[in-house]
Image (cartoon, helix red, strand yellow):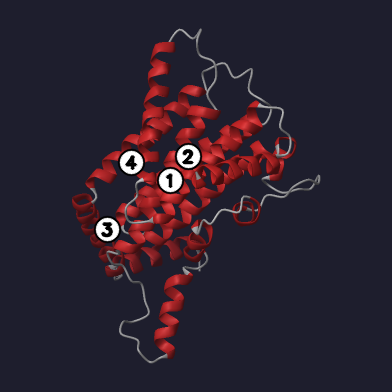
Amino acid sequence: MREDSLRDRLDELCRNSNTNAVDNILDFQKGHYDKFSKEYGRFIDQYKMFYSALVDLTYSINYLDKSKWPSHRALQFTLAAHNQKQLYTAFFLLHQGFYEDSITLIRSSYETFLRILFISCNQEHQWNVFGNKEGGPKFNALGLVKDELKLDWPTYRLMSSFAHSNKVDVLEDVVQISREAQKEPIALRLKYDEEKMGVAINYLQFLILVFLKLLNEVFVVDYSTHEQREQIRTEFDKAKEYTDILMTIMETHTNNKTFRRMAQDVKDIFQLIHTMEETEEKDWKNAWSRITTSQKEIAKS
């Protein structure tokens, strides 16, 4: 078929096609956004505020004197900056009703945070976050949290179940078919789901917290002689207040004890980052052992 004939045929097919599926999705998105805005309006407003501060502060750091940054900081900063598109897209997909896709992007953003942590702990092997062709420790998101930090975080496994072909819903439907208990067609299914929504909201708040802390505590540079130092100080102070608020939210989470526990873990992780960045400590596992042992002793007293 000639190119112009193919084009004409496609135009004809489009004019006479049934696009109800897409139209119905668009209707669902609008209805979901309206309901989500009504029930979670405060979360939307707060996320916009936190996210905007994250983007603005990242932009500002570009124009500060970074000459005293260690050699690995550029990679960490760049990882954090490029991650911000995913943090917005995950938020957008959430309020449009596409929870699984939102959680999949959140998983990628969570990996970025772990890569930045890995770099602070293994500064001589910073590029091993993308492989280990030159030897040294290998980055593995699940292994770092579960086997090395020994943190009881369900985060990665939980989010992976959505990222890997939406295993959660697939297995549920397969079970229903095998039991001959299928009630709905196996097809595109869009609905308002409070449980999945809660997963996305909790982890978006967690990620905004850790990335704001990185900007305010790790990527910060000396701006005391900058001509706009008062404005810059205001930006950093605002980010500090936001991280304090988000940390308090995690520490007092009434519905999820996992997040209350993770709040202390985040404090410990940043203590580890500061130890590796600001002292002569070379063995991050020894440093981590001291930090967690100290916390256990405090908890007992």
Inter-mark Cα distance, 4 to 1: 11 Å
- Please say if 285 is above or below 81: below
Tell which circle, 4 or 3, labels the residue nearer the N-terminal end.
3
Residue 179 is situated, as x and y percent measured from the top left of the image, at 40, 91
Tell me the residue that label 1 is attached to: 206
Relative to the observer, which residue lies in front, 90 or 136? 136
Inter-mark Cα distance, 2 to 3: 30 Å
Tell which circle, 4 or 2, labels the residue nearer the N-terminal end.
4
Residue 59 is situated, as x and y percent measured from the top left of the image, at 46, 26
Question: Could you say which disc has been placed on residue 29 in the image?
Answer: 3
> Mark 4, mark 2: which one is toward the viewer?
2
Could you tell me which secondary element the residue under label 3 belongs to? helix
Residue positioned 60% across, 37% down in the render: 272
Is 63 left or right of 70, judged from the image as shown? left
Question: Could you say which disc has been placed on residue 47 in the image?
Answer: 4
Tell which circle, 2 or 3, labels the residue nearer the N-terminal end.
3
Dot 2 and dot 3 residues touching (CB under 8 Å): no
Tell me the residue that label 2 is attached to: 210
Dot 1 and dot 2 residues touching (CB under 8 Å): yes
Inter-mark Cα distance, 4 to 3: 19 Å
Q: Amino acid at mark 2?
A: Val
> Mark 3, mark 1: which one is toward the viewer?
1
Residue 203 is situated, as x and y percent measured from the top left of the image, at 42, 50
Could you tell me which secondary element the residue under label 1 belongs to? helix
